[in-house]
Amino acid sequence: MTGGPGGPAVFDPYSLPSDDNVNPYTFCVELKGSQWLLQKGKMIAYYGRIEFDGVGHGRFDRLLRTSFHSPLHAGDWVVAEGQGKMLLADRAYDVNSYDLDDGNLTIRAGNLLAYQPSLALKQSIVPGFLTLIGTGKFVAASNGPVVFMEPPLRVDPQALVGWADCPSPCHHYDHGYMSGVLGGIRSLTGIGGSSGEEHQFEFVGAGTVLLQSSEALMAERPVGTVGAEPGVPGAGAGHGGHGGQGPLGQLGVRMPGQLGDFQRRLGL
């Protein structure tokens, strides 16, 4: 297959961009004897000599002291180190890089793919979110292009990607939802769910709010497991993931009251 006129673009280590998008769904990170921290399962290919180690590895103790302060998510992250170019992607979601300049940004944990160790990652006080502080580049995914908004603003929780340089949001509930019969039933039983028209996150003060162009959250997926797909060696075998035991666990089905991977991430 060649990349002639009208054909697909074919890349090699020299034609791949450096620290930039290959297409809207794939980002290329170049390592020059440097390090990046990335979430497990987000690297799809690489050229060169790159090693991947868990964030708890002994020789990265100094890196942990300066760049990773989220024990709840430690099992989901690795350190990439070496020489070469690696491609990052997440299930064909939109992927983009962002630069922080002596700033802070809080982002939904599942949306953050990777970041430079010049940034410090901390566990946000808001469950399910992580905070990056300092100066450096990070890569994030979203379900649709990201829209940047200025507070004051109320946001559908499903559309929220994160916020920068502004206070954490408050919960806001529509008066009709609070006073109506259905709202009371839902608050007590959880049956029926809710929507952004009934419940929002409210942002005030200065700063920037990041929204994805969709009300559908990026689906959580256990990392470290091999999908049960034809032709994949070891398909269905667990390698450190949280899949349940027995037929239901292998299919990803969870019984009522059973803790899921997302709940574990929130410490529930």
Image (cartoon, rainbow, N blue to C red):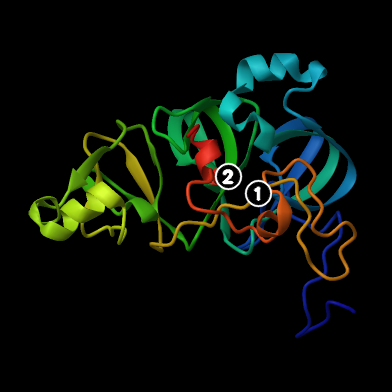
Q: State yes or no: discs 1 and 2 in contact (Cβ < 8 Å).
A: yes
Image location of residue 136, percent across then percent down:
58, 32
Q: Residue at x 80, y 17 (%)?
A: 58
Image location of residue 253, percent across then percent down:
60, 59
Find the residue positioned furthest to the bottom: 6
As shown in the figure, which amino acid type bears the numbered disc 2? Asp
161 displayed left or right of 167: right
Q: Nearer the viewer, residue 227 or 12?
A: 227
74 displayed left or right of 266: right
Residue 264's image quarter? top right
Q: Is residue 114 above or below residue 254?
A: above
Q: Which mark is residue 268?
A: none
Q: Is residue 165 above or below residue 253?
A: above
On the image, numbered disc 2 is attached to which residue?
Answer: 261
On the image, numbered disc 1 is attached to which residue?
Answer: 222
Image location of residue 98, percent across then percent down:
53, 44
Q: Give me the C-alpha separation between circle 1 and circle 2.
A: 7 Å
Q: Is residue 170 above or below residue 215?
A: above
Q: Residue at x 90, y 79 (%)?
A: 1
Q: Secondary structure at mark 1?
A: loop
Q: Residue at x 68, y 61 (%)?
A: 251
Mark 1 and mark 2 lie on one chain; the one further toward the N terminus is 1
254 displayed left or right of 126: right
Q: Nearer the viewer, residue 236 or 134?
A: 236
Image location of residue 69, percent across then percent down:
57, 21
Q: Nearer the viewer, residue 69 or 82?
A: 69
Residue 66's image quarter? top right
